[in-house]
Image (cartoon, rainbow, N blue to C red):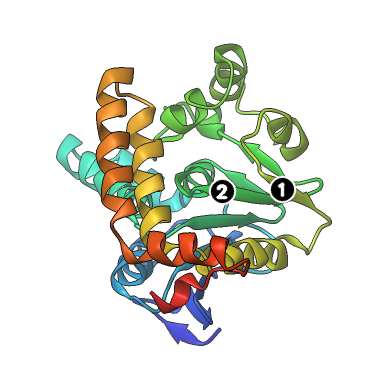
Amino acid sequence: MQQPVSAAQTLTRQDGGVLTIVNSDPKTRNALSWEAIDGLRAAVLAAGEDDSVRAVVITGAEGFFSSGGNLSGLKARSEADYSTRRGSVDRLHAMIRAIRACPKPVIAAVEGGASGAGVSLALAGDLVVAAKGAYFSVAYVNIGITPDGGSTAFLSASLPRQLVTEMIWFGDRIPVERLHDFGVVNRITEPGGTLAEAQAMADRLAKGPAHAIAAGKRLISSGQTNPVDVQLELEGDGIAQALGGAEAREGIRAFFEKRKPDFTAV
């Protein structure tokens, strides 16, 4: 993985339709420095516009996903004025928004653990694969600050209020096995196995109907906030559009011909 995006800390490799993005700064357990934030955002934006990329995997280097915000940087920003402090958060949020808006499936492969904004990075994607013994820790409260990066939105959409409260108020390490029980984590692997599992899932998605998957991602997002009647309208328009498209023609034809559809050719 030798292709820097905007800094040496962000490395990419493409295998077929799957792009793997690695946040690589092992000395800080892959903290989210400005270089990492900007590099991740640039890589995801580029993937979204590249027709050869059909699915994305995000991971951290050398056995740890991300320790979150760099504490030295937080100390410097604590001494700055509000506009500077807010601007730094908006820079992180631009990266999170890029992941959420990416039309391609995004899978996080979590080894070791994710802390602070690293939790937000993991949950901003669509699926999470985590290793046994790994943890999530929303540890902002330990230094007297509040969460950012969308962690309260992502967790509140998936977990009971009491568990989210425990995570935000105490900042303790929550085992991924506990989160898997609630469906926040999709797959649990042996340590060292998350990347292979995430890439296998991504490869399966990369061979699927790209337009239908992208439309499904949009519907999942809007379905979290829309009233049922509004969502029904979006679903009605979506399937009517899809039925007239090349993916549907290939899928339906393959069904009647008793063969596997080839969506990569349409």
| Mark 2 neighbour density, 10 Å: few (under 14) some (14–19) many (20 or more) | many
- Residue drawn where x is 55% and y is 56% of the image: 107
The circle on residue 127 is 2
| Most foreground residue, 124 or 23 | 124
Q: In x, y percent, where is residue 193?
A: 77, 63
Quadrant location of the C terminus in the rendered image: bottom left
> Residue 83 location in percent, x, y?
15, 40
| Amino acid type of the residue tagged 1 in the rendering | Arg
**Marks 2 and 1 in Cβ contact (< 8 Å):** yes
Query: What label does residue 187 carry, if any?
Result: 1
Sequence-wise first label, 2 or 1: 2
For residue 248, what is the image quadrant? Answer: bottom left
The reply to whether residue 145 is visible in this rendering is no
Q: Nearer the viewer, residue 257 or 210?
A: 257
In the rendered view, would you say 72 is above or below 170?
A: below
Disc 2 secondary structure class: strand
Furthest-bottom residue in view?
A: 2
Residue at 39% across, 27% down = 224
Left/right placement of residue 179 relative to residue 177 reads: left
| Residue at the farthest front position | 256
Q: Seen from this angle, which residue lies furthest left?
A: 83
